Image (tube, rainbow, N blue to C red):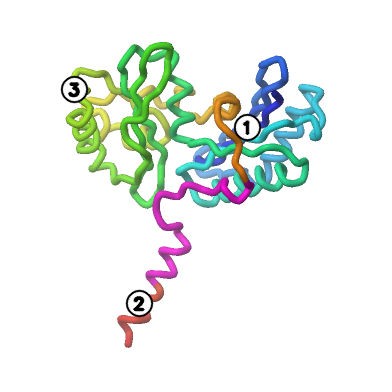
Amino acid sequence: MIVLGLDTATRSSAVALRTADGHTLQARDDPGPGAHPGHATRLLSMTSELLVRARVRWGGLERIAVGVGPGRFTGLRVGIATARGLAQSLPVELVGVSSLRTLAEAVAPRCSEQEIVLSVIDARRGQVFAAAYATATAGQLRELESPRALRPEELAGAVRQIDELHGAGASRWLAIGDGAVLYRGALEDAGVAVAGDGSPEHLIDARVVCELATRLAPAGTLEQVVPDYRRAPDAQLARGHVALAGGSAR
């Protein structure tokens, strides 16, 4: 199956193309500090470049997979709109994939049995999106804690709660993702190991998006693939603040 995988949940734009023989090509755009994310300008050009390298026509795609977050609101909207537009125009099957699970799936084969992986994505506004997964035989993952928005100071409590609920007190924890880098101190204080700042483990790998897409059923309709925000978008919160301010003035 020829699969195109996209993820824009973080500042990075990640694209991969899985060919019919199972080989996967990838392209990335990782903006430096202070640089603007290039989701809107880079996704289609990177995809086109991969298709040319693989000698695959647009019409040769059989399935498109896209990371649905949780993550940055603007990035998610761009990535999902791009994936839905391509799926509709080609037309091909569309699959939505959890961006937090994608992070964990990438490191699972290298983890010891029963190690717990905490995927952490920067949610901005002093929060992170996090989910926990236990590794088992053959690198399979079991979700221990579904994605949720947390403040950095709540991470230690979440780790303790998961340990208590699942009897995982003796397990080793590993945190990955840009949120883990940003709040390394809070995680290490909770006894959670964090990969080095420059480790590729902190980057969402679109090759894994493609791999997950081969294991998941496609959406029944394109409209079923939507962003997983896990909290109100910034624009909605801003409107709420304006409404409250207006109400307090009366």
Q: Amino acid at mark 3?
A: Gly
How packed is label 2: few (under 14 Cα within 10 Å), some, or many (20 or more)? few
Residue 164 located left or right of residue 22: left
Q: How crowded is the residue under tag 3: few (<14 C-alpha within 10 Å), some, or many (20+)? A: some
Residue at x 41% of width, y 42% of height: 122
The correct choice, above or below, for 49 with respect to 37 in the image is: above
How far is mark 1 from mark 2, CA to CA?
43 Å
Q: Earlier in the sequence, mark 1 or mark 2?
A: 1
* Residue 10 belongs to magenta span: no
Label 1 residue SS = strand
Q: Please identify, in this view, whether the residue under mark 2 or under mark 3 is nearer the observer.
A: 3
Residue 245: numbered disc: 2
Q: Quadrant of the C terminus?
A: bottom left
Q: Position of residue 41 (x, y in %)?
A: 68, 45
Residue under the image location 45 percent in, 57 percent down: 233
Most distant residue in the bottom direction: 250
**Residue visible at 41% across and 46% down in the picture:** 123
Proximity of marks 3 and 1: CB atoms separated by less than 8 Å: no
Q: Is residue 195 visible?
A: yes
- The Cα atoms of the two marked residues, 3 and 1, are separated by 36 Å
| Residue 107, disc | none
Camera-side mark, 1 or 2: 1
Q: Position of residue 145 (x, y in %)?
A: 32, 35
Label disc, if present, on residue 169 of the rendered structure: 3
- Range of the magenta residues? 221-241
Q: Amino acid at mark 1?
A: Gly
The numbered dot on residue 5 is: 1
Is 114 situated above or below 241?
A: above
Q: Is residue 48 left or right of residue 80?
A: right
Q: Position of residue 244 (x, y in %)?
A: 34, 75
Q: Residue at x 74, y 31 (%)?
A: 61
